[in-house]
Image: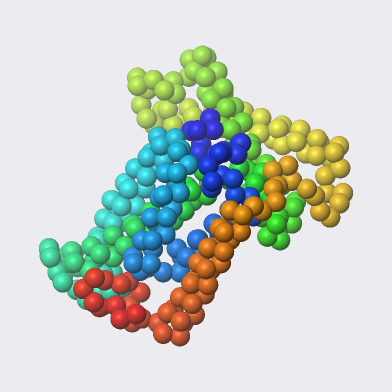
C-alpha cells in the first residue's frame, strides 16, 4: 500500500530523506512560490531538472509515478490543449503578443505558432508543479510533515490533524478493498467485464456507506485515545520524528534562502516594477522582459 500511494511512513536512507521536516517543508513552500511566480520556461527549466534529479536519487517505485504522469499528459496535455484551441484560439496572441497562423479552418478556428507555444508552456508549468509535489511526497513522512509545519509556526493541533489525515489513507484504502471483496463474494458485479460500466459505477455506491461508517468509527477511536493521553493539555509538544538540523540541513537551507531571494527579486523587479508587455516568453522575441 505504501508503494502504491507514494506516501512514505518510515524515513528513507537517501540524503534527501535524511533532511529534517522543517527543511523539507520550507523548501517545498519556496519551490512552490518559484513555480507559481512565472510562466517563463527558461526560469522553470532549472527547477524541473533539480526536482527530477531529486526524484531519481530517491529510487522510488516508478509505476504509480508513471501512471500519474500519463493521466496528466492525457488530461492537461491533450484534453486541456484541445479545449484551449477550440474555445480560445486567440490565447497565443493574448499572452505572447504575436500570431503566426499555421492552420486555419475559419476566422474563429485556427492554430498559430504562438498558440502551440502557449499550450506547451502551460503544460510545462503543470509538469514542474507535479514534479515538485512528487518530490515532496516521496521525501517526507506524515510525522515529519507535522513536525516541519509546527517548526514554521503552525499550531501543533492543526499539524496533528494533517499527520493523522495522511496516516489514515492506507487504512481507508484497505477498508475499501475489504468491502469491495465482500460485496463481490455476495454476487455484486464490480470488476467483472460482463457488467456494463454504468452498472459497475452504480453498484460501487454500495461501498461508500459502510466505508463512511467504518471511517467515522476509526475517528472516534483515535479521538478517545488522544483524550486519554492528554492531547492539547500543553501549549507545545514534541514530535517522534523531530531531529536536530545537521550540516546537510544548513546547506540545504542556505540554498533555499538563495532561491527565496531570487523569488523576491523576480516578483518585485520583473513582475511589479518592470513588468514585461506579455506574460509568456517566446524564443522568437515578442517578450521584452
Q: Position of residue 193 (x, y in %)?
A: 35, 21
Which residue occupies 52% across, 68% down?
Answer: 258
Q: Is residue 152 left or right of residue 69?
A: right
Q: Position of residue 55 (x, y in %)?
A: 44, 46
Q: Position of residue 132 (x, y in %)?
A: 47, 53
Front one among 126 and 51 = 51
Which residue occupies 37% across, 40% down?
Answer: 66
Front one among 140 and 219 = 140
Front one among 73 and 144 = 144
Which residue occupies 72% across, 36% down?
Answer: 219
Determine which quarter of the picture holds residue 108: bottom left
Q: Position of residue 198 (x, y in %)?
A: 39, 31
Q: Is residue 65 left or right of residue 212?
A: left
Q: Quadrant of the C terminus?
A: bottom left
Which residue occupies 53% across, 47% down?
Answer: 16
Determine which quarter of the picture holds residue 151: bottom right
| Residue 205 showing in the rendered view | no
Determine which quarter of the picture holds residue 200: top left
Front one among 137 and 174 = 137
Amino acid at each position: 500500500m505504501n508503494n502504491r500511494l507514494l506516501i512514505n511512513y518510515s524515513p528513507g536512507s537517501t540524503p534527501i530523506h535524511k533532511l529534517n521536516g522543517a527543511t523539507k517543508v520550507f523548501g517545498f513552500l519556496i519551490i512552490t512560490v518559484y513555480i507559481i511566480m512565472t510562466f517563463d520556461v527558461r526560469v522553470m527549466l532549472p527547477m524541473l531538472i533539480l526536482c527530477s534529479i531529486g526524484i531519481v536519487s530517491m529510487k522510488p517505485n516508478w509505476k504509480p509515478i508513471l501512471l500519474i504522469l500519463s493521466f496528466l499528459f492525457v488530461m492537461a496535455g491533450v484534453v486541456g490543449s484541445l479545449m484551449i484551441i477550440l474555445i480560445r484560439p486567440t490565447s497565443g496572441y493574448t499572452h505572447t503578443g504575436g500570431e503566426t497562423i499555421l492552420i486555419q479552418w475559419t476566422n474563429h478556428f485556427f492554430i498559430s505558432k504562438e498558440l502551440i507555444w502557449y499550450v506547451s508552456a502551460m503544460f510545462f508549468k503543470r509538469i514542474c508543479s507535479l514534479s515538485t509535489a512528487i518530490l515532496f511526497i516521496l521525501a517526507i513522512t506524515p510525522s515529519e510533515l507535522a513536525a516541519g509545519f509546527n517548526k514554521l509556526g503552525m499550531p501543533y493541533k492543526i499539524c496533528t490533524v494533517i499527520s493523522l489525515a495522511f496516516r489514515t489513507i492506507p487504512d481507508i484504502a484497505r477498508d475499501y478493498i475489504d468491502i469491495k471483496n465482500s460485496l463481490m463474494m455476495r454476487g455484486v458485479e464490480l470488476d467483472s467485464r460482463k457488467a456494463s460500466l454504468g452498472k459497475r459505477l452504480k453498484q460501487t455506491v454500495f461501498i461508500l456507506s459502510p466505508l463512511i461508517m467504518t471511517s467515522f468509527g476509526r475517528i472516534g477511536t483515535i479521538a478517545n485515545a488522544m483524550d486519554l493521553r492528554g492531547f492539547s493539555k500543553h501549549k507545545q509538544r514534541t514530535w517522534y520524528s523531530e531531529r536536530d538540523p545537521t550540516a546537510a540541513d544548513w546547506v540545504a537551507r542556505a540554498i533555499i534562502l538563495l532561491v527565496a531571494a531570487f523569488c523576491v527579486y523576480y516578483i518585485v523587479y520583473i513582475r511589479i516594477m518592470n513588468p514585461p508587455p506579455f506574460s509568456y516568453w517566446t524564443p522568437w522575441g515578442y517578450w521584452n522582459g
